[in-house]
Each structure stands twice: as C-alpha cells, then as structure tokens.
Amino acid sequence: MRRIAISVATSSLILSLAGCGVLGATGDSDDATPTKGNDITVGLLLPEKANTRYDKFDHPIFEKKVAALTRNQGTVQYANADASAPTQETQLQQMIDDKVDVIVLDAVDAHAIAGGVQKAKDAGIPVIAYDRLAEGPIDAYISFDNELVGEVQGRSLLEAIGSGADSSDKIVMMNGSPTDPNAKQFKQGALEELEGQVTVARSYDTKDWKPENAEANMAEAIKEIGADNIAAVYSANDGMAGGIIKALEDAGVTDLPPITGQDAELPAVQRIISGEQYMSVYKSYPQEAEAAAEMAVARVQGRDIQFDALTRDRVDSPTAKDIPSQLVPVIALTQENIEDTVIADDIFKASDICTAKYKDDCAALGLN
Ligand code: GAL
C-alpha cells in the first residue's frame, strides 16, 4: 500500500508540473537551457523476444515518445538480446563504442551486466535501468511495482480457489528466471499472500522465462503430485501459463485448475475469456515506456527538475543505494475488466481478441 501511495503521489506531481509547463510534456524544448539539443541518440536494450511485450509495445512506444520529445530529431538505437546475457553485453559495448547519449537497459542478467554499466559510466554515458533493476552504477530506475505484481497474483489465486481454500490444498509455483531480479520480487509478493493459506507442493525457477521450460517442469510436477491433486498453479507470466496448460492437457486434464499469469499477452487474454486461465496482470506499457523516454531525454538535456519529478521513489540494488526511481502500479486482469484495461488503453481491439474461436465467450461477456 505504501508503495502505491508513493507512485500515485509521483504521478500527480508530474501532472501538476506538466500543467505549469515545467516538464515540457508537449515536447517543447524551448523552456530550458539544455546541455544537449534535440539531436540525441538514445540506446534501448531489451531482453527477449519470447515474451511479445518488448518488440510489440515497449520498443515502439518508447521510440514514438522520444520522437515527440525531440521534435522528431532524436533517434533510438535499439537492440534485443533474445534472452542471451553475452549478446546483451556485446550490444551494450556497441552502444558505448557508438557514443550514444544515454542508455536505457532492461537486463537479461541483472548481475552479469554490472561491468558493462560501469564501462558506460566511465565513458560518460548515463544508464537508466528499465523494468529490471540492473546492478552497477545506474543513474535511475523505472519499473512497475514488482512486489505488488506478486501480491496481486497470489490474492487472485486464493480468490479463484474460493471459500473452500484450505492449507492442505496443493499448488505448484512456476517462478520466472533466476537472473531477473523481478522474478524474485514476484515470488516474494505471491508467497506473502499464499503462505499459511495453501501448500506449495512444488516450486520452480524457470530458466530464461521460457514457456517450454515451464512445460517440462509442470510435467514433472504432475507426475509427482498427481494431476487431480493440484488445486491451482501460480504462473509468474502468461508465456509460461501457456506451457503449463499444455502440460496439463497432455496429462489428460480437461477441467483446468485456476492458473495465474502476467503481461496481458493476447493469447492469455483469450484464455481468460474462455476460462482456461484465471487471470493476468495488466501493466500499462505506455506508462512505463513513456516515462522512461522522458527520463532519458531529460537526463541528456540536463533538465534536472523534470528528471527529479520523474524519479521520486527510491530503491536499493545489491550494489547501489537510494536509486532515484519511478514505480508504476499494476492491476489484476480478469474476465470482469478486459474492456476497461487492454481495450480502453488501445493495447488490443475487441476484434483482435474476439476471433471466431472466442466469439461466443466474448458475447457472453458483452465483448464484441
Ligand atoms: C519480467 C517483466 C515481465 C515479463 C517477464 C518475462 O522482468 O517484468 O513483464 O516480461 O520479465 O519476460
């Protein structure tokens, strides 16, 4: 609750500053004495492709915002590491060699990339950690409230099991990649809700967040616990929920237990509509990516008041304390609020979701 209050306070401050023209939120850059003009290059390093959010939303939204903030003069140099930490290190080095003005980094491996972050700093290039808290001397951090993500997932799971929930009910926990610090926070948040309420019969960390790894782990869990004895499955994201459902179906399960997710990916939203997946966590990509673009441009142009207003939260990483941050709140996505979230925010159109296979389920929910 405390963290949400901080974020809300931050957003309203940003709104009021924007109203006074302090933030130059319209992209007007005449109201400051910039250390650099609009002709800047922003490096954007994203971690993977298996999860569609990065190429489909984070990257294009970020790029559009940088253009808007720089009167179309700023450019984004983009690289996606496809879940490989060494590839990301090479991509980061390339950006240092190319002398980009600032780097926005979503780490594949938050610990392993610390040396690269130090090299960027030594070259005078500020690094803003995006979504995942990279170690090393970063300038700032923007992410969602990741512990809240886990809490929302855990609470939803209990709600799905219903009033009959009992501490002997067995659940399987499918957590994210051990190199992603968010995965640890999702797990922590979820366990806060689940401990004492249900029994975590098996818990896995999933290499590279890969759906096929989650599928293999789920197949093992089914063998050991027995499909009929699994009351629910905690899945840290939607991609893995897909793998988990495959494993359950391969084991002959027709009546699926409640399964959680995260990211509001299109197949997951469709599964929520048909009842195969209980929930996802909706994270507003525009909010995160646009704030990151504002932070990067403000940092390069030396707009300190704007930069401070965008980073009023504070977090610690294993290597740095009191990092200026912005944590964006999240919400549970269930059958009840599809219209008010992904459709209202233009992430998907009802027609993207309600394809022939889902027409009847959509109609039953009043979506068309
Ligand atoms: C997390 C991110 C999630 C999800 C996951 C798998 O770090 O916060 O939104 O994308 O990685 O890629």
Image: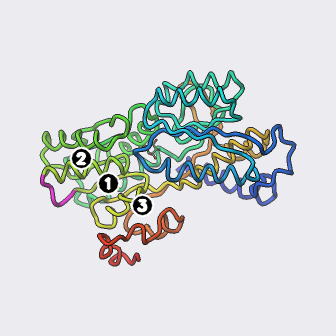
Give the Cα distance between marks 3 and 2. 21 Å
Q: Where are the magenta residues, as a range?
A: 252-256
Secondary structure of the residue carrying numbered label 1: helix
Tell me if 63 is positioned left or right of 354 in this view: right
Foreground mark, 3 or 2, reads: 3
Secondary structure of the residue carrying numbered label 3: strand
Q: Residue at x 45, y 40 (%)?
A: 48
**CB at disc 2 and ligand 1 closer than 8 Å:** no
Q: Circles 3 and 2: CB distance less than 8 Å?
A: no
Residue identifier under label 3: 333
Q: Residue at x 38, y 43 (%)?
A: 192
Residue identifier under label 2: 171
Give the Cα distance between marks 2 and 1. 10 Å
Decide which of 288, 311 is in the foreground and name it: 288
Residue identifier under label 1: 157
Three-letter amino acid code at the position of disc 2 = Ile
Secondary structure of the residue carrying numbered label 2: strand
Q: Residue at x 29, y 70 (%)?
A: 357
Vertical placement of residue 39 versus 252, above or below: above
Tell me if 258 is positioned left or right of 268 in this view: left
Residue 23 position in % (x across, y down): 77, 52
